[in-house]
Amino acid sequence: QKPSDEGCVFDAGQVKVPEEFHRAYKLYREGEWLAMSDDPEWGGQGMPKTVSMAANEYLYGACNSFMLYNMLTHGAARLVEIFGTEKQKKLCLKKMLSGEWSGTMLLTEPEAGSDVGALTTVAKKNDDGTYSITGNKIFISGGEQNMVENIIHPTLARIEGAPPGTRGISLFLVPKFRINDDGSLGEFNDVVCTAIEEKMGIHGNSTASLALGGKGQCIGTLLGKENKGMSAMFNMMNEARQMVGLQGFANATTSFLYALNYARERIQTKHLTAPPDSPPVTIIQHPDVRRQLMIMKSYVEGMRSLIYFSGLCFDRIALADSEEEKEKYDDLIAVLTPIIKGYITDRAFEVCSHGIQVYGGYGFVEEYPVAQLLRDSRIFQIYEGTNGIQSMDLLGRKLGMKGGKPFNNFLEEVRKAVEKARQVSGLEQLVANMETVFSKYQEVAVEIGKASRSDKILNAYAFSHPFMEATGDIVMAWMLLWRASIAAPKIGKSKKDTAFYEGQVKTAQFFINTILPITSGRLDAISATDGAAVEISEASFGGK
């Protein structure tokens, strides 16, 4: 982790990544890790998505700053594969999926952040069918770096005369260096890095400001259809949202493992019930430390199952025998994406905060690893659509999508896990407690859905984030109960695995009996949809 925290160096338009990244990138490319689950025709390994998710847990957990370069390259390559012409695919795909070239996504501008439709980057059509691109982009992860010889920038811009807003946005393929017809590199394409940001975290990843066409020499080719850039870019954004959830989960896992190891080694004070003259014990013996470790463990293991479940959904889409089956799993992913991106990254930051707390004062010191994990985790709640936007997506789109069928399919998956657990001896009380909160959740989902389509729309959206949190809690309980129902019958059958299986049951017990009651209270607040937040005047906030 530490080399990645030293950051990138900007010098006259060039960016140098941490020196250690070069060897890591060489090994990463040699292992063909970038395209594990991609089409072998373009250099992929053709593995199941579930396998790549599992492998990426380790890779992202080791260094998110480094892996962010690769995440964006993969997403950009997928755009070329889906929307590119045969020529674009031939020139770019293999080199991107092999890591010889990298990729980014150019959306954000100084006055166009979440409101992408406000962008001002212009594309002027040339006689040869290419486009001259002019504009400025900011906050571009991996926008400039020195591990590759070329960078491919999928870029949102508006063709001259196109409609305003998102309806008039097109997507273009803009390379750092122009690409000749034989695949060799041509002249510099007038994509200039003007600065990189000084950030709270992910210092090893360059967050660049790019000036396109400052000298009138930036050339791009249309990717997909004119004025359909936003719908095309959402393919990359949805993948990125899945991967940002994985980033958060991986960081949380690393923080938990560091904290767990530290708690097993750090000796402080006697046991709470021991005689006064007893020797000090490791802090994992203390109840409040155990509480924090259980919070971390329950979220991390619930996140892991959710991430892997999403991978399974992708695999079932790829292997579906019917359009109906494909649609079912595609819809499940759609409903779960705000939870994967929004809820997981919120909870990941919380887990990393607990990691620092377990370390105590040492956690606040940069010599120890958990401080960096917290700093790195904060951006996950912001980029690829802020978590407020994710919650609005859940309430405004996913809840009522296709007449509510996808959301009901999600609820049915939860019910199936509850029914499975009901058949397992020893889980009866957990099932009952889960059902109580799950039943209330379903009622509240209907209530807030109706409120969002009524004159209480502002009140409803003021509670969209709490609703996402409640939905995420239900998903965590679903995953942990599912794990417990598999683990419980195996306890005692193999001595070496007993502690692991017992841990699964205890983790589900902790979450359902300790966290879900808090969820129940949150659901009461959502049901009431109090209007204070939207009724208070701006002046009444104070501060002047």
Image: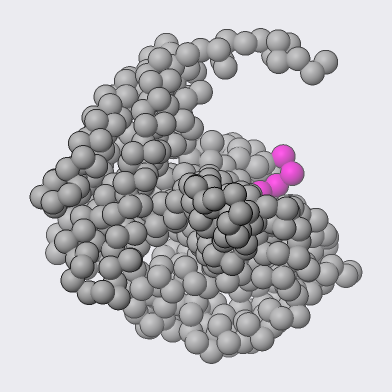
Tag count in the figure?
Answer: 0
Residue 108 belongs to the span the image colors magenta: yes
Name the one closer to the observer, 188 or 371. 371
Residue 271 visible to an observer of this rendering: yes
Decide: is 89 above or below 122: below
Decide: is 263 above or below 116: below
Q: Position of residue 262 (x, y in %)?
A: 59, 64
Query: Image check: 108 left or right of 317?
Result: right
Q: Position of residue 308 (x, y in %)?
A: 35, 62
Q: Position of residue 450 (x, y in %)?
A: 33, 20
Name the one closer to the observer, 384 or 283. 283
Residue 129 visible to an observer of this rendering: no
Q: Residue at x 29, y 54 (%)?
A: 505
Q: Residue at x 55, y 85 (%)?
A: 29
> What is the magenta segment's predominant secondary structure?
loop
Residue 501 belongs to the span the image colors magenta: no
Which residue range is magenta in the image? 106-111
